[in-house]
Amino acid sequence: IDGAQEKVRLIGVNTPETLDPRKQVECFGKEASAFVKNLLSGKSVRLLSDTTQNDRDKYGRLLRFVFLEDGTLLNKKIIEEGYGYEYTYRAPYRYQAEFKSAEKIASTEKRGLWGDICLGRESKIQNF
């Protein structure tokens, strides 16, 4: 942004852990990372803040919704495809109802991390 490198934390979505050195790589984490990298590599995106959220998280990352060049909301697409799950941090946010609905559909249809590949694993989503 304006010539500076910024890290972005996606509002309303969490994906299985792959980078935290204190934790094991979680089920479907590598797939989720590859999915997002494939969508973003070499692309321009539009970032949108949400007044219900802080501008940055505790690690200094920008808190944003990310829109792809075709207008697709990346945060929601990750959930829809089963590469992540809805995550509310402290306060409701702009697209919360849509994200929760997308998660319910992905779960029902056993997409991605909701499929049998992660069934019964300890690292499966813990927020239910």
Image (spheres, rainbow, N blue to C red):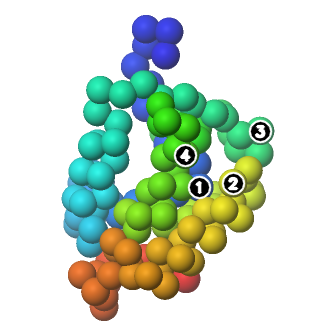
**Of callouts 1 and 3, the N-terminal one:** 1
**Crowding at label 1, few (<14), some or many (≥20) Cα neighbours within 10 Å?**
many
Q: Nearer the viewer, mark 3 or mark 2?
A: 2
Left or right: residue 98 compared with residue 109: right
- SS at mark 4? loop
Q: CA distance from mark 1 to mark 3?
A: 13 Å
Q: Is residue 43 above or below residue 24?
A: above
Q: Nearer the viewer, mark 3 or mark 4?
A: 4
Task: Look at label 2 and name its amino acid.
Answer: Tyr
Tell me where residue 13 appears, x and y as whole percent. 52, 57
User: Is residue 104 at all visible to an observer of this figure?
Assistant: yes
Residue where numbered disc 2 is placed: 95
Q: Nearer the viewer, mark 4 or mark 2?
A: 4
Query: Do the CB atoms of the residues marked 4 and 2 lie less than 8 Å apart?
Result: yes
Residue 44 or 24: which is nearer the viewer? 44
Count up the numbered dots: 4
Kindly indicate the quadrant of the structure image that contains residue 56.
top right
Residue where numbered disc 3 is placed: 51
Q: CA distance from mark 1 to mark 2?
A: 8 Å
- SS at mark 1? loop
**Crowding at label 4, few (<14), some or many (≥20) Cα neighbours within 10 Å?**
some
Q: Which mark is residue 12?
A: 1
Q: Is residue 108 above or below residue 92?
A: below
Q: CA distance from mark 4 to mark 2?
A: 10 Å
Tell me where residue 112 appears, x and y as whole percent. 33, 71
Q: Which mark is residue 73?
A: 4
Q: Which mark is residue 116?
A: none
Residue at image coords 74%, 58%: 92
Q: CA distance from mark 3 to mark 2?
A: 12 Å
Task: Look at label 4 and name its amino acid.
Answer: Leu
Residue at image coords 47%, 31%: 69
